Image (cartoon, rainbow, N blue to C red):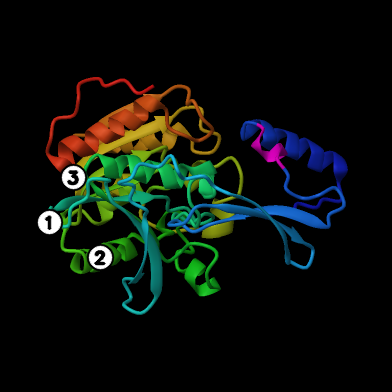
Amino acid sequence: LTIIVSSNHEYFTATHREANTMFGGLMSANGVSPTGNYAVVSRSRVDEAPISYVLDRDGKQVLELELADISGLPQDWQWPEPVKMKAADGKTDIYGVIYRPRDFSPDKAYPIIDIGFNVPDAPTVPKGSFTNSMIFGGTFYKPFALAELGFIVVQIDGRGLPYRSRDFMDHAYGCANDSNDLADHVAGIEQLATRYPYMDSDRVGIMTMTGGAGGLMGLLNHPEFFKVGVQDTLPDSRLWGSTMWGDMFEGESPSYTQLEDLVDNLKGKLLLMHNLMDHAAHPAATFRIVHALQEAGKDYDLVIEPKPKFFRGMSAYQDRRIWDHFVKHLLGETPPHEFKLD
């Protein structure tokens, strides 16, 4: 529950109006009573149905309102599994979620897809189920879709993300794209593959959901581990129209190797995507990579979306191209030709 208080009414009203338009009216929903004495909240875990109830100002539960109706889920529904691992340093605890297909069998070998963000102001792993998670459920639903295609999908919160200790978050200070350290993902997936032998660590893909550079960085910084990657709407702190990344998470004079200078490392199958109307990530970031890949003589696939159908979200066409990319290059099968998603 977040309550915003501002002494500047006109500024707050204008800012709220702009944000509400950006988020399609969803910010107008408010669970706080007019008196401020009660609030409606929802809680869940990734493996439990959401429950909504009323709290008073002391945090005491006054009334249980509703438990989400999950009777419509299929009988072979596979709840995701919360997991705990060690980071690449061998001592820091990190956490994640595993998604399995509905026809899962422990006797089969499954390719792995690592999906999420690596931005310094948002964690990857959903903390609740369905829409009671980040981006109105986006981080919860997309892994299920990929898992149904025959993959084990993992989400991991590595070092460099918020909502842990200060040291945990400052791990990536100086390079915003290094948040959610991918070395932790490699270490975590290797541990999970040992724990669950049906996870094939020789066939690992990685993708970023509209933000963060993980899909590209995985292939460039860990080319022996990640074989297939999808990079959607690449951000670049040099191109932000505000200081929300550059100054805050990198300081005044950051010094690190730019991604376009690492393209010679590319060995895997890369799909680049970009929404030209994204409010934060300038398309020049992706085109810098395109130019560098061409100069290096590297093969890649590119999808440019002129107008996304959802705020910072992927269109059905982009979703299908992502599925096709992983099915073809990671699963080793031929996807349906030009399958149209409603």
User: Is any part of residue 133 visible from this angle?
Assistant: yes
User: Label 1 near label 2: C-beta < 8 Å?
Assistant: no
Query: Residue at position x 35%, y 23% from top?
Result: 341
Residue that appears at 39% across and 21% down: 342
Q: Earlier in the sequence, mark 2 or mark 1?
A: 1
The question of residue 244 being in magenta is answered with: no
The picture places residue 136, in percent across and down from the top left corner, at 54, 42
Q: Position of residue 86 (x, y in %)?
A: 33, 73
Secondary structure of the residue carrying numbered label 1: loop
Q: Which residue is mark 1?
A: 107
Find residue 273 and report its image quarter.
top left
Write down the residue under mark 3: 268
Q: Position of residue 17 (x, y in %)?
A: 74, 34
For badge 2, the amino acid type reads: Leu
Element type at mark 3: loop
Q: How many circles with numbers are drawn on the protein?
A: 3
Looking at the rendered image, the disc whose residue lies closer to the viewer, 2 or 1, is: 1
Instruction: Inspect the magenta stretch and tell me whether residue 26 lies in it.
Output: yes
Across and down, in percent, residue 261 comes to: 30, 48
Q: Does residue 297 appear anywhere in the picture?
A: no
